[in-house]
Amino acid sequence: MEIPSKYEPQQVENRWYDYWMQHRYFHSVPDEREPYTIVIPPPNVTGVLHMGHMLNNTIQDVLIRRARLQGKNACWVPGTDHASIATEAKVVARLKEQGIPKSSLSREEFLEHAWEWTHEYGGVILEQLKKLGCSCDWERTRFTMDDDMSASVIKVFVELYDKGLIYRGHRMVNWDPEAQTTLSDEEVIHEEKQGLLYYLAYQVEGSDEKVTIATTRPETILGDTAVCVHPEDERYTHLIGKQVVVPICNRKIPVIADEYVDMEFGTGCLKVTPAHDVNDQQIGQRHGLDIVDIFNPDATLNSYGLHYEGQDRFVVRKAISKELEEKGYLVKTETHMNKVGTSERTKAVIEPRLSEQWFLKMKDLAQPALDAVLESGDIVIFPNKFINTYKHWLENIRDWNISRQLWWGQQIPAYYYGEGQDDFVVAESPEEALEKANKRLQGTRMLTAADLRQDEDVLDTWFSSWLWPMSVFGGIMEPDNEEINYYYPTSDLVTAPDIMFFWVARMIMAGYEFRDKRPFKNVYFTGLVRDGQRRKMSKSLGNSPDALKLIEEYGADGVRVGLLLSSAAGNDLLFDENLCQQGKNFANKIWNAFRLVKGWEVAEFEQPESAAKGIQWYDAKFQQTLELIEDHFSKYRISDALMAIYKLVWDDFCSWLLEIVKPPYQQPVDTKTLEEVTRQFEETLKLLHPFMPFLTEEIWQHMAERTEEEALIIASWPEIRGTNTELTAGFEYAAEVISGIRTIRKEKNIPMKESLELQVIDAEETGDFWNGIIAKLTNVTEIRTIETAPEGALSFRVKSNEYFIPVSGKVDVAAEIEKIQEELAYTKGFLKSVQKKLSNDRFVNNAPEKVVAMEKKKAADAEAKIETLEKSLASLE
């Protein structure tokens, strides 16, 4: 097989991905091996690959490929989420472009358009993940709206309802006026925004007195049903029980007393609008107040809005404040910082709204999920800095609003047969619902299917994805099937911390509720991908690069390395495209190393001693690195594991080993050395494969003729056999000696072809084990121990040993003496300035400990350098 001169990822990646797919290396079926299972965080069916997906799925692929090499039955289940709000919004927008309003369609007609959209765009992101090299079991691809997945959701709803955990309630909910649906608390982002505080005068009925009320939302005065004061506020006790007149609408409302009012905020008077604020609603319930809802579902004003009917709330805010001012009701305005809730999906400002919704009681469900992380250690979170956030949310959990006013999603399985509040049944099918309803009516009347009306709402998308680790294996519909028993609990979950509450915590609750088992053992939270200005990457900001273009430019392996090198565990990733270039350079370095080895001629002769020792050292260094990366993997420090391998390949294999074993120019290498270096290269490729799958498979297949059973993707992960620390430490010492000689050659312009002699005052017995390697890599013909410093030599120090290189006739001694004298004078001056600082008691006593320690180190380094320079000077003079 001819080896190309350059590594061309575009020529390689599709070929090997097709090969892996063709031989079904990604596919898993239950067998006798230990399972290793990951379920993908299902991306939105409308989505395309972005940098967050790239990072998250690269990490998952690293883990799954490593598990496969370790001989485990690796199963990575892919899939997509139907994303009710996002998908419905996309479909509605497309229909609008075609001149079709959603309101003109029946539910069934709309769903046809939604499915059409899904079939057109639903697989885009999964195909893009293949470009990244993701080794998912594509035969297992799931979609949260698949028939069996939807059936699982409905079954769970019915079970929870029958247990009394799901209920209908008229509650204040978060209303997204753009998507026109409710949101759970976790889907609302609270942002600090500067607005105005409006001070408005309300006339007290039957008197000239006025009360001033401060509000951030003057448009809501049209829904006021009371003014509230603190019962102990002496300024207003005389008004309790009286009535005031609401400006503009002239409605008379009572003055009530409630301890909720903060006497220090604003004027101490609170306008109460029970339909539009959760705290006002609670006051209204305590005092039996009327409820006046002034908004339409799209946040325009309804008929209670008087002459503002049909206008948007923010338009009305400006107009009504102007009217209030003109009519003398506006006393003043002040700037005011306010926390404003916005929709995570549409970015619309949330409206609190009273609505009939379905809720899931969470407190009892949350306790096992808390205990699993905080008490038993059944589930482990990495990095552990996220545990407190997890704990806080679960300890303060509120009931989950699970209904959404949409058509795309699983329709709530509640069937109404009358107008009464309790005239409904909950069932898995219309047939079962009819049977339940007739049983409840006990023969008072006999219903037919036409008498039943199913609830219009659908379930929150997260209500399907919280079942994901179970439902993908059929564990809800067939709780004892072979696959769920084999693959569940899954092994690792890799996701971003921003869905800790939406998804991770809820999956844990579902696992204990429906299978009495954790859904996964380890949760690894990645950081968020940010740009150089620390802004979260997003399409709206235009700061997110095109993921596929990056792959085209740098190769999938280069992008994977670039992402992981900048992604310390759990910390946000400050993405820089230069890191992808670094990944591409790394791939080229490995390819060139491979071409070098494959290009050697081979002959039968005895292995040189330097090559044997170099191979012996690299085996020890490899084992040392393997132990280190296993430790990193156990702590989910994936980028640290990659960096350890990076250094092993770039520094130890390429820069040291290949130089040690490389035969002289145009000379062959011995058979034994080539065999052993090839073995070491192959073992190193195994470590690299999870991170750089395409490049490593390409080199692996070039190195020898392989059968499909011998592909790298299913090779065996290297075994830990123990590290020879004496050998690795010895080589580190030898490397410093080599570096010292090379530095002198470079500084003094002594070419490599000119041989040198190396002399050492052996204060620390080092032996001559590495002398052959030192000699080969520096063109030193003789290394000998001496008692005293020779004349006419340059020196350097390694630990307590002093090395000398006689340079008489090789360098201009007079010029060298002058240069050393200059450097010596400078260093002495520098030392004097540091010592002066350290002799200043005020500095030593007041400066931070680290600063003082740094100055002491500077002084010690300067003293050591002066000693070396003086010895070099003495040997030359």
Image (cartoon, rainbow, N blue to C red):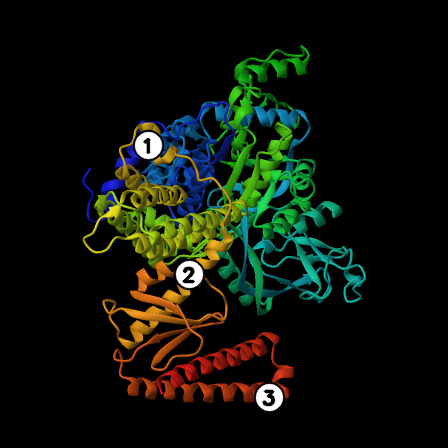
| Residue at the image position 45 percent from the left and 75 percent from the top | 787
**Disc 3 element:** loop
Residue 108 location (% of width, % of height): 41, 26
Q: Which quarter of the rendered picture does the C terminus lie within?
A: bottom left
Residue 838 location (% of width, % of height): 58, 85
Disc number for residue 768: 2
- Foreground residue among 274 and 562: 562
Q: Name the residue under label 1.
A: 20
Q: Which amino acid does label 2 sit on?
A: Asp
Rendered view: 550 above or below 862:
above
Disc number for residue 710: none
Is residue 175 in view from this perspective?
no
User: Which of pointers 2 and 3 indicates the residue nearer the eye?
Assistant: 2
Q: In whole angstroms, how far apart are the C-alphas of marks 2 and 1?
A: 49 Å
| Residue at the image position 59 percent from the left and 13 percent from the top | 447
Horizontal side of residue 537 vs 248, given as left or right: left
- Foreground residue among 424 and 493: 493
Residue 771 location (% of width, % of height): 38, 61
- Foreground residue among 495 and 346: 495
Rendered view: 650 above or below 689:
below
Q: Name the residue under label 3.
A: 839
Horizontal side of residue 323 vs 254, given as left or right: left
Q: In whole angstroms, how far apart are the C-alphas of marks 1 and 3?
A: 69 Å
- If you read the primary sequence from the N terminus, does the residue marked by circle 1 or circle 3 appear first? 1
Q: What residue type is labelled 3?
A: Ser
Q: Which quarter of the rendered picture does the N terminus lie within?
A: top left
Is residue 821 in view from this perspective?
yes
User: Dot 3, how many residues are within 10 Å of its Cα: few (below 14), some (14-19), or many (20+)?
Assistant: few
- If you read the primary sequence from the N terminus, does the residue marked by circle 2 or circle 3 appear first? 2
Query: Quadrant of residue 2 in the image?
Result: top left
